[in-house]
Amino acid sequence: MVARFGYNEDSFVMEIASNDGYLLQHFKNKGVPVLGIEPTQNTANEAILKGIPTISEYFGSGFAHELSLREQKADLLIGNNVLAHVPDINDFVEGLKVALRRSGVITMEFPHLLRLVEDCQFDTIYHEHFSYLSFTTVKKIFESHALEMFDVEEVPTHGGSLRIFAKHKKDDTKAISPNVEAMLQKEAAAGITTDEYYLDFQERVDAIKYELLQFLVDKKRAGKKVIGYGATAKGNTLLNYA
């Protein structure tokens, strides 16, 4: 982001759901002023110990107006794996608009609905996720708040995520990448906006469950041990369903 947009000591980078400041520390090390917004106080405290200014608060339009009154608006507004987690996505996106400087950039990452359906990633469906997002839908939501997509990338995180780039609709300093239209066409070609696209999802999920159970039974009968490691939310969906 520093290489692409030239952020420096005169810029201001804000991250929503900034956790322990792991990402922001790299901006700080390059001399870029930062602010983390992290609702869990104990995690925010870890960031503060690292010297990352952090506010323990949930982000939305009300809080964004508070930041605006303090003249804390972002040149770069980051949110990785938070857009799918918010109960009121419209209030959240309105907050992004309020907290963004005139020529600022919003970048968000979230698991891609296309990959969830195509690869049958049913374990991505769990309590923390309020939304399962396509680029087509996110573009519409952002546009309803006068924000415009100008680029999108596919990244491998969480079995396949999208990283979107947005700006104020009135900001004409950034060209719209061909990636935007290409992603819309990719989703349309897959049928993501049609009911039919989702109709056989349950059957495909069932098949994975039966294959997993058969695999475990076969290993048990062969005298093998089965060991589970880790504590992901996805793991609980898989274990409870199977």
Image (cartoon, rainbow, N blue to C red):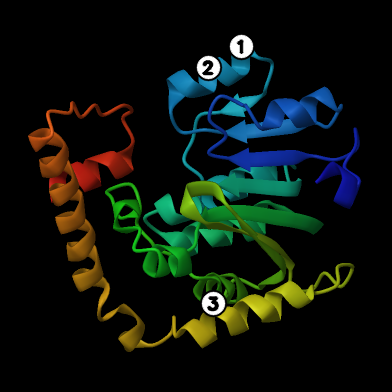
Q: Which mark is residue 45?
A: 2
- For label 1, the residue is 49
Q: Determine the residue positioned at 75% across, 56% down.
A: 105
Q: Position of residue 26 (x, y in %)?
A: 75, 28
C-alpha distance separating marks 1 and 3: 40 Å
Q: Position of residue 199 (x, y in %)?
A: 26, 81
**Front residue of this view, candidates 29 and 41:** 29
Give the foreground label among 1 and 3. Answer: 3
Q: Secondary structure at mark 2?
A: helix
Q: Determine the residue positioned at 18% across, 42% down.
A: 239
Q: Determine the residue positioned at 45% across, 61% down.
A: 89
The amino acid at mark 1 is Leu
Q: Which mark is residue 136?
A: 3
Looking at the rendered structure, the number of numbered marks drawn on it comes to 3
Which of the two discs, 2 and 3, labels the residue nearer the N terminus? 2
C-alpha distance separating marks 1 and 2: 6 Å
Please report contact status of discs 1 and 2: CB closer than 8 Å, yes or no: yes
Identify whether 29 is placed above or below 124: above
Q: Determine the residue positioned at 69% across, 16% down.
A: 51
The amino acid at mark 2 is Asn
